[in-house]
Image: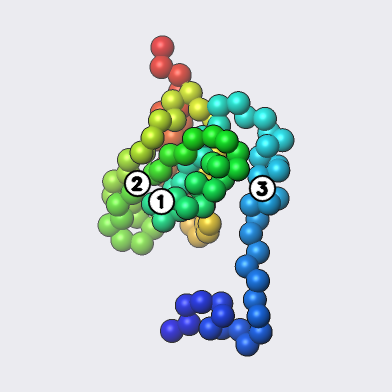
């Protein structure tokens, strides 16, 4: 099974990252209460890099799947109350995960009286 790009191509391949473009755009949004959220534990390295570049905190959405594209349980690790949540992910296939997380993130970000 071919799992790496170098196993697939017979020529040198460079990895292209969008963070250089995204970070500058995100900075222009001037979100004062921004927090970076990763939709799964596997994205913590990527989210941590964005968090570092943008100088803001990071939270993790920990989810347990019954099967592919079906989340049975999810918890947010970190505080997002009153924050502008920026969800960073690498691949979106069905958007089932982000759509299921959105109500939790919105519910938590509503200011508590």
Furthest residue in direction bottom, as rendered: 10
Q: Which residue lies at the image location 41% right of the left edge and 17% below the top edge?
A: 112
Q: Is residue 8 left or right of residue 81?
A: right
Say which quarter of the image contains residue 84: top right
Give the image's coloring scheme: rainbow
Side of 67 relative to 35 (left or right): left
Whether tag 3 and tag 2 are in contact, CB under 8 A, the answer is no
Which residue is disc 1 drawn over? Answer: 40
User: Within 10 angstroms of label 1, few (less than 14), some, or many (20 or more) residues?
Assistant: some
As helix, strand or loop, the secondary structure at mark 3 comes to helix
Q: CA distance from mark 2 to mark 1?
A: 6 Å
Q: Quick one: 100 or 109, which is closer to the camera?
A: 109
Query: Mark 2 or 1 closer to N-term?
Result: 1
Check disc 2 and report the residue beneath it. 62
Sequence-first tag of 3 and 2: 3
**Tag 2–tag 1 contact (CB < 8 Å):** yes
Give percent across and percent down for residue 107.
41, 29
Looking at the image, is 113 positioned above or below residue 100? above
Q: Quadrant of the C terminus?
A: top left
How far is the residue under mark 3 from the one under mark 2?
24 Å
Residue at the spot of label 3: 22
Does residue 102 appear in this view? no
């Amino acid at each position: 099974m071919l799992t790496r790009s170098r196993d697939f191509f017979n020529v040198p391949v460079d990895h292209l990252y969008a963070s250089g473009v995204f970070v500058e755009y995100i900075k222009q949004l001037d979100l004062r209460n921004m927090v970076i959220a990763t939709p799964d534990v596997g994205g913590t390295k990527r989210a941590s890099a964005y968090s570092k570049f943008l100088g803001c905190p990071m939270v993790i959405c920990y989810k347990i799947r019954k099967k592919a594209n079906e989340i049975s349980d999810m918890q947010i690790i970190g505080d997002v109350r009153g924050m502008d949540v920026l969800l960073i992910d690498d691949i979106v296939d069905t958007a089932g995960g982000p759509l299921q997380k959105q109500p939790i993130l919105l519910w938590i970000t509503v200011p508590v009286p």
